Image (cartoon, rainbow, N blue to C red):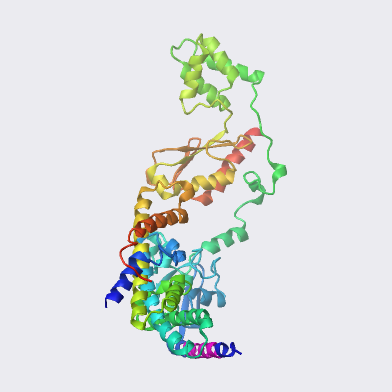
């Protein structure tokens, strides 16, 4: 019978604590009805909730869509919204997820804001952008296989190997004719070969050495010294993502990352159909328009990740037209 | 009085709750990245540890001992700690919003901090009087604060240098720092004698 008293004691303690907490809950936590005004990109919504809870649960229970994956633990940082009025100071638990800019603009995590008075909030369109793209099909699904490999394995273009045709010999002859009597023309000749074939094929290097009466090693020295020359086949369209200071600060790294994902290749590689080559560059000289990328000789300033499709599309079409 | 000072010094230095007993490691690891959060957390720990020890002592000695039901003291302490933290949070949020914003957000994290329970259990095991318990609880929490502030300060410096090997970044390096600091604290060993 020795366990009877402990059971009674613990029941008593639990009872007292429960009563105490429920009294405190009644007296301290209720804040009456609070009106929440939600501004979104395209609409404004108003509703009233009982105060004391968190903004995130108030929003989701009233049908306002907001992203959240940790359900209010302040660990995912997705439920960002701008509290225009009545939110109070930003909490240390939120600061980790906010950039300086976001902190100044009054961005908060909805799961950390307590509803104590009337709130006026703005939900940015992180979510609606994604939905808009899916609904409006901004992407042409027919074009996507070109860049994305997932699920489309069977239509990946065959890797193309550049061969030297007899016709090309004519082109090579023409190049050498042009520079016949010009002293010190090795580099221009290599440049021409490079622009014709997109790389320096080994047989042509040997030929160049023979015709110019130079040792092959000297040609090789030049061909490996300059960044513009490549000894391996290279994509026809060279995409250069600027990693200069101002482009980097403005998100060049993210552009590069998205580009790598889109093309399925890493920096310094070529797509399998040799249509694109991806490189970084230290400065294009357009720091005012950062982030900048350049494709061949064309420069795209104020670049955004969602412009990638359009830009790549342009050069894909170009390739198709020139082939047909 | 001398006895109380001994207990206080022992709780901070020779019997430091974080470095000697390795208690309260969860917030110790996760909140020791910057001195600011470490300070907020340790303030909350000082407050809650002292408060709960002061509440738990009378509950143990005036309720559990007379009712001859000491065997449930673990459960009772846990319940009392959880409830009192909850209550304190409600009161703070209602009447002292600036205080709540400063360290109130750490309060829910403390409910599950083993430092709080450990202090209450130690007070039973070592048979402290009421005053001694409060002093011991306060000293233990201050000791925890000393430990976490040292580690946080080292962490801030480390973040500036940034040459921690890749596999050791994050939790691992904090455990190593804590281990070395604990070794250093062993040096205080002969200073005071407390049972």
Question: A246 or B25, which lies in front?
Answer: B25
Q: Quadrant of the N terminus of chain A?
A: bottom right
Residue A267 in the image, given as x and y percentages of width and height: 52, 39
Name, please, the residue furthest toward the left: B1
Tell me: residue B186, above or below residue A253.
below
Tell me: residue A244, above or below residue B168.
above
Q: Main secondary structure of the magenta part?
A: helix
In this rendering, would A294 be left or right of B54?
right
Question: A103 or A283, which lies in front?
Answer: A103
In this rendering, would A313 be left or right of B89?
right
Question: B77 or A195, which lies in front?
Answer: B77
Residue A99 in the image, given as x and y percentages of width and height: 40, 59
What residue is at 57 percent from the left and 27 percent from the top? A232
Looking at the image, can residue A297 be seen? Answer: yes
Name, please, the residue furthest toward the right: A154
Residue A175 in the image, given as x and y percentages of width and height: 54, 17
Asked where in the image residue A65 lies, by quadrant, the reply is bottom right
The part of the chain drawn in magenta is A8-22
Residue B67 in the image, given as x and y percentages of width and height: 50, 90
Magenta highlight on residue A12? yes
Q: Quadrant of the C terminus of chain A?
A: top right
Magenta highlight on residue A49? no
Question: B90 or A112, which lies in front?
Answer: B90
Tell me: residue B85, above or below residue A292.
below
What residue is at 42 percent from the left and 46 percent from the top? A248
Looking at the image, can residue A97 be seen? Answer: no
């Amino acid at each position: 019978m020795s366990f009877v008293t402990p059971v009674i004691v613990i029941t008593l303690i639990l009872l007292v604590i429960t009563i105490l907490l429920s009294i405190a809950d009644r007296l301290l936590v209720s804040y009456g009805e609070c009106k929440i005004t939600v501004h979104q990109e395209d609409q404004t919504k108003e509703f009233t909730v009982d105060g004391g809870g968190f903004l995130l649960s108030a929003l989701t229970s009233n049908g306002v869509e907001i992203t959240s994956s940790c359900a209010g633990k302040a660990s995912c940082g997705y439920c960002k919204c701008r509290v225009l009025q009545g939110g109070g100071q930003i909490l240390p638990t939120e600061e980790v997820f906010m950039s300086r800019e976001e902190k100044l603009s009054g961005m908060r995590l909805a799961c950390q804001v307590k509803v104590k008075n009337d709130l006026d909030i703005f939900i940015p369109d992180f979510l609606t952008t994604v939905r808009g793209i899916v609904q409006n099909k901004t992407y042409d699904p027919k074009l996507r296989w070109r860049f994305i490999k997932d699920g489309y394995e069977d239509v990946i273009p065959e890797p193309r190997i550049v061969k030297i045709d007899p016709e090309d010999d004519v082109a090579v002859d023409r190049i050498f004719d042009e520079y016949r009597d010009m002293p010190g023309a090795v580099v221009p000749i290599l440049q021409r070969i490079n622009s014709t074939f997109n790389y320096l094929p080994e047989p042509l290097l040997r030929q160049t050495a023979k015709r110019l009466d130079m040792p092959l090693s000297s040609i090789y020295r030049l061909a490996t010294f300059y960044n513009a020359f490549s000894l391996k086949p290279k994509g026809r369209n060279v995409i250069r993502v600027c990693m200069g200071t101002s482009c980097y600060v403005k998100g060049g790294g993210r552009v590069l990352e998205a580009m790598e994902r889109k093309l399925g290749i890493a920096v310094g590689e070529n797509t399998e159909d040799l249509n694109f080559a991806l490189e970084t560059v230290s400065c294009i000289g357009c720091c005012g328009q950062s982030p900048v990328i350049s494709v061949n000789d064309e420069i795209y300033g104020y670049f955004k990740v969602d412009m990638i499709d359009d830009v790549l599309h342009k050069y894909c079409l170009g390739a198709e037209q020139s082939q047909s | 009085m001398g006895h109380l000072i001994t207990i206080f010094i022992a709780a901070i230095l020779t019997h430091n709750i974080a470095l000697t007993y390795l208690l309260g490691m969860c917030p110790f690891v996760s909140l020791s990245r910057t001195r600011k959060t470490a300070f907020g957390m340790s303030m909350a720990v000082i407050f809650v540890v002292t408060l709960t020890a002061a509440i738990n002592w009378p509950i143990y000695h005036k309720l559990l001992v007379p009712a001859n039901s000491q065997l449930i003291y673990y459960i009772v302490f846990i319940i009392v700690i959880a409830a009192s933290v909850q209550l304190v949070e409600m009161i703070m949020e209602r009447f002292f919003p600036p205080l709540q914003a400063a360290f109130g957000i750490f309060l829910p994290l403390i409910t599950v901090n083993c430092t709080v329970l450990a202090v209450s259990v130690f007070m039973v095991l070592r048979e402290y009087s009421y005053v001694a318990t409060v002093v011991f609880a306060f000293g233990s929490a201050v000791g925890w604060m000393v430990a976490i502030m040292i580690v946080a300060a080292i962490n801030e410096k480390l973040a500036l240098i940034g040459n921690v090997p890749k596999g050791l970044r994050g939790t691992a390096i904090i455990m190593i720092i804590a281990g070395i600091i604990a070794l250093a604290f062993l040096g205080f060993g002969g200073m005071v004698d407390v049972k």
